Image (cartoon, coloured by chain):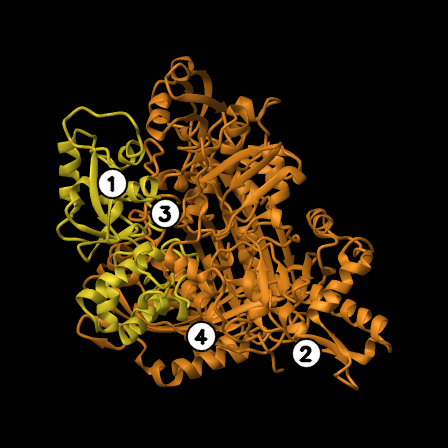
Amino acid sequence: MNPKLTRRRFIKGVIASGAAATSTTIWYTANGQSRPAGAVERMIRININGQMRNVDVAPQETLASTLRYKLGLTGTKLGCNRGECGACTVLVNDIPSYACSVLTHSVKNMRVESVEGLESANGDLHPVQQAFVDELSPQCGYCTPGQVMSAVGLLRSNPNPTREEARQGMAGNICRCGSYDSYLNGVMRAAQIG
Amino acid sequence: MAYMHIGKDFVPPDVPGKVTGRIKYAEDYARDGMVYARLLTSPVPHGRVVNIDASEALAMEGVFGILTADDVYPDGEPQSPGLKVLTNEPTLMGEPILAVAAVDEKTAENAIAAIELTIERLPFVLDPLDSLEEGGANAYNGGNTFIFRQGFAEEKWTSDQVESFRSGNEPTAEAQQSWEYGDLEAGFAASDFVHETTFSTAGYPHMSMEPRSAMAYWENGKCFLHGTSQSLSAIAEPMAAIVGVPLEDFVFINEATGGGFGQRARAGSIPSMAIPAKLSLKINRPVMMRVSREEEFTIGGARQGLQGWIKVGFKSDGTMAAMDMYCVSDNGGKGGGGDANSAAAGVSALYQTEAMRFRNTSIGTNTGHRGAQRGPGENQIMAVVAPILDKAAEELGLDRLAIRKLNAAQNGDVSGPRSTPFTSAYMPEALQQGADQFDWEGKKGRSRQTNGSKVRGLGIGQGYHNAGRSGMDGIVRLMPNGRLQVHNGIGNLGTYSYASTSRAAAEVLKMDWENCDVVTGRTDRHLPITSPQDGSNSIFTNTRTCFGAAQDLLAKMKEIAAMDLGGETADYDVDGTRVHQIADNTVGMTYAEVAQRGIELGGKFSGESDLPEELNTLTTLSVSRLAGSALMGIYHDPRHSDNPPGFTVTYTEIELDKETGKFEILDMVTIAECGTVVHPQGLANQLRGGAVWGIGLSVLERHLYDPQNGLPASSGYWQSKIPTYLDTPAEIGTGWVDLPDPENPVGARGIGEPAMGAVSAALNAAISDALGGHLFDTSPVTTDMIINHIAGVSEEAKPLAQNNFRG
C-alpha cells in the first residue's frame, strides 16, 4: 500500500470534496454525470502509462473508476472497491496503490501505471508477466493484474527479494483461488530474469 | 503410456490475456447506449413486500425503467426454495426486490432512494436449532424446511430434544433423510475404542473475486448476455429459460470467470444475470448491472453449516467398524445443499467404514443462500474426523499413518449406501508417497515437542470427492486449412481444464498443439453440452468427450482415405499432418485435403446426417449450425456406472504458540491420486489453491450475523477472512501417484475439491496434536478457541452455534 496515499488521506480528500465518505457511495457516484458544488477543476491531465491523457474527473472520483470507465483501461479490476482485496492495484510513482482508494485528483501530478502499460512497444511481455505465464501463476485471473502490479512495484524497490520478502511484499493482494505459491514462484523467477 | 500432450505442461491460450489484463470479464464490456441497473434489496432478513411506490423515481430525469418480481413472475413467484431473480418475499437480508435502470449508477441510486417500499417485517431465525425448537421462528413463509415434491413444511422438536442435542447427546427426533448399510450394532459391539460427540462446522461465503456483474442487450430478437459461470454450455438452456427466450435465440458470452467454487455452476445459483436481460428487453437498451462486494456476499452463496452428532467405533487393529452420524443442516435463506449426505458418503469412501448409518434434517435460516461450495460436505467432515482417527490410534496404540493405511480405499473397494465400486483407487500408494515426500518417519517424533511457549503438531489428512461424470457430448472439426478446432463448453475458471481436456483430441489425431484451436467463450461459437465445471468432474468427463469426438473424426478420415485412395480403413493411420497407408506412407492425404473432401462428401462427414443417438439438445443445435463447414467428429458419451474418485493426502507440521494461540505452518505436502496426470502445472495449482481453501475452512472462515437484527457482519473479505499470503505457507509441496484409471481413455480423474479436504483434515489434526490430542470437534478452530482451551476456559458454551461466535 502506498504510504503516501493512506485510507486516512483518501477519506480526508473525499470529505474535502464534499462527498460522503463511504465506499459504496463512492462506487456509485464516481460514474455520475451531475456536477457537484464547488470550484474543483474537472478536466484534468494525468500521466497514465507514460501518456498525458485529458479526462473529465468528478471531485470524488476514484482512480479505479477513471481508469476503467473513462479511459477504458479495464485491466484494473474491482474486487471489493473498499481497499480489502488489491485487485485494483496500480503503481503511483512506482508505489503499489489501491486504485479504488485513491482519488484521481490526488494523482494528477504523479505517474500512474496500470497493467496495460507494462508490455514493450514490440509486444514483449514485462518480465513479471512472462514469469507469471511460465509459472502458470494465475488461476481465475481476476486478481492477476493487481498481483502483476504489486510484483512490479516490489521488484523496482527490491530487485532481488528473498521468498519471505516477496511474500510480505505481495501480502496486500488477495487471491481467492489460492494461487499465492504460484505467484511467489513467478516473482522469484522474474527477479532472476529481470 | 507415452503421450504427446497428456502429462505435459503448456500455455493455456487465455493466460497471456490474464497477465496483460486483456481478457474480459462480464463487467469489462460496454455497448453504445448502455444504461446502468441498480438493485433495491431487502432491508430485513425476512419480510413481505406490501407496496412499491416508484412513481417519483420513474419521473426522474435519466431513469428508464423498473423491474420488479411482478414483472418477472406475472403468475406469482415459484413456491420453492432457491434464489429468485427478484422477490416480494425476501428471506435473507439484501435479497434483490427490484432493479432500476438509469443513465448512470448515481441516478439509479437516487431513483431507488425515491422509491417508497412498504415491507412487512416477519420473524427471522439465524440458527437451525432455534428454528427447530417449539415456538422458534420459521425462515420461510411456508415453514422452516422444504420436502422434495411436497413443498414447504414445518419441522419442530420439543425443547427437551433440542436441549439434549445441545448438551451433546444423540438426537432423538426422526430425521428427514436416512440411509444405512452393514450391521451397526455389531460394529460398535466389536469396537475397542468408541468416540461419541456432537460437532459443528461453519457456513461461510464463496467470495469469488469477480462479483457476479452482468450486461445484456437484444438484437434482432436475440438476447446477448455477458455473464459469469462455471459452464458455458450447461448453463445456456436453463438460463435461456429464466430469461424467457428460446435457446436458439440466446447467446451467453463468458470468456473468463473470476472464481466460481460451486456457486456459479447452475443457472439457478446465478439467476440475477436475468435482471439486466429482462430490463434490457423492457426498456430496449443495453443494461449493465454491476454487483458490489456486499451484494455478492448476499446472493453469492455460502457453504452449508452442519450441527451434528457422531459416534465412531474402531476395532483393536484400527479398522473403522462403525459410524453413526446425525446432522442438522443449515439451508440458509434460499435453502439447498446436500452437504450432510456427501459428508457421510465421503467418510464411507475414504475410511471404508464397515457399517454406517446416516441421518439428516435440513432447516432454513434467514442467512446467506446455501449451495455447493468446493467439496461440499466432504471437506467439512474430514476436518472433524481426522483428529478422531488420531485419538483412536493413540488409544489403541497404533501408528497414525498405519491406521489410515488400514482403512484406505483401494482397487476393488466400494463405498456409500449403494456399495458403488470405484473405477480405480490407490489411496495406500498416495499415503506412502506423501509419507516419503514429507519424511513422516523422520518428523513424527517431533509431535508435541515443546520449545518455550511453542509446541509442534503434526497432522495427516485425507480428502475425497466423486470426480467424474458421463453422458455429455463432444464436437471437433478438421478445417479446410488443416487445423483442428475443439469445441469445448467448460467454463473458464482458472483450472484450465477447458484447454487441457481439449488436448485429448489432439492426442488422438497426433497433432501439434500449435495446429489446434479451442473454440469456447460464447455459445454462438456452437458448443457441445458439457457437465458444469463442478464436482471435480471436468478432467474425467471432458477428456472422454474430446477423445470420443476425435476418434469419430479419425474414423471418418480413414474412411475418406480408403474411399479415395483404395484399401480398407484399417490400412490407414495418421501422423499429425497426413492420413496415410500404413504399408506405404507416401500414399495419403493431408489433413487439409481430407477436411475439404469431407465437406464435399457432406452427409455424416460434415455433420449433416447420421448424428449419434441421444445427442443433447444444445449439441444438436450447435451441430446443425456447424454442418457443412468442416469434416466433423461428433460424439455422445455413454453413461458409466462406477465411481471415479479423486483422492488426496496431506501431511503438515505446525508450530503453535501457547501464549498467543497462533500457529505457523512449517511444512505442508499434498499428494493427488487422480489417475493419469493431464496437466502437471494445472494440477499443482489445484493442490496449492485447495490447500489455501483448506486453511480457511480449518481456522478462519465463518458466517457472522447480528442476532438482534439479522444483519450480516461478514460481508467483506476482512470479516469472513479468507487466507492471505501471510496465512499460508510460502511453499506448498505437491506430488501425484499418476496411475491410470481404466474408465477414462487417457486414464484421468478429477481432483479440485479433495485438494482442500485433505488440508483441512491435516491442519485440524495437527492443531489437535499440538494440544495433546484435544478434540475441538468443529471447524473453524479459531485462535480464540485455542487460547481459551489452553487457559482452561471452556469453549463449549454454545458448542453447536451456527452463524455466530461459538461460545
- The letter of the yellow chain is A
Residue bearing mark 2: B575
| Label 2 residue SS | loop
Q: Is residue B84 visible?
A: no
Within 10 Å of the Cα at label 2, are there few (<14), some (14-19), or many (20+) other Cα atoms? few
Quarter where residue B729 is shown: bottom left
Q: In the rendering, what colour is chain B?
A: orange
Q: Position of residue B218 (x, y in %)?
A: 56, 33
Which label's residue is closer to the chain start, 3 or 1? Answer: 1
Residue bearing mark 1: A54
Q: CA distance from mark 3 to mark 2?
A: 43 Å
Within 10 Å of the Cα at label 1, are there few (<14), some (14-19), or many (20+) other Cα atoms? few
Residue bearing mark 3: A74
| Label 3 residue SS | loop
* Image vertical order of residue B338 relative to residue A21, above or below: below
Within 10 Å of the Cα at label 4, are there few (<14), some (14-19), or many (20+) other Cα atoms? many
Quarter where residue A58 is shown: top left
* Letter of the chain that mark 2 sits on in the rendering: B
Residue bearing mark 4: B393
* Residue type, label 1: Asn
Relative side of B553 to B755, left or right: right
| Label 1 residue SS | strand
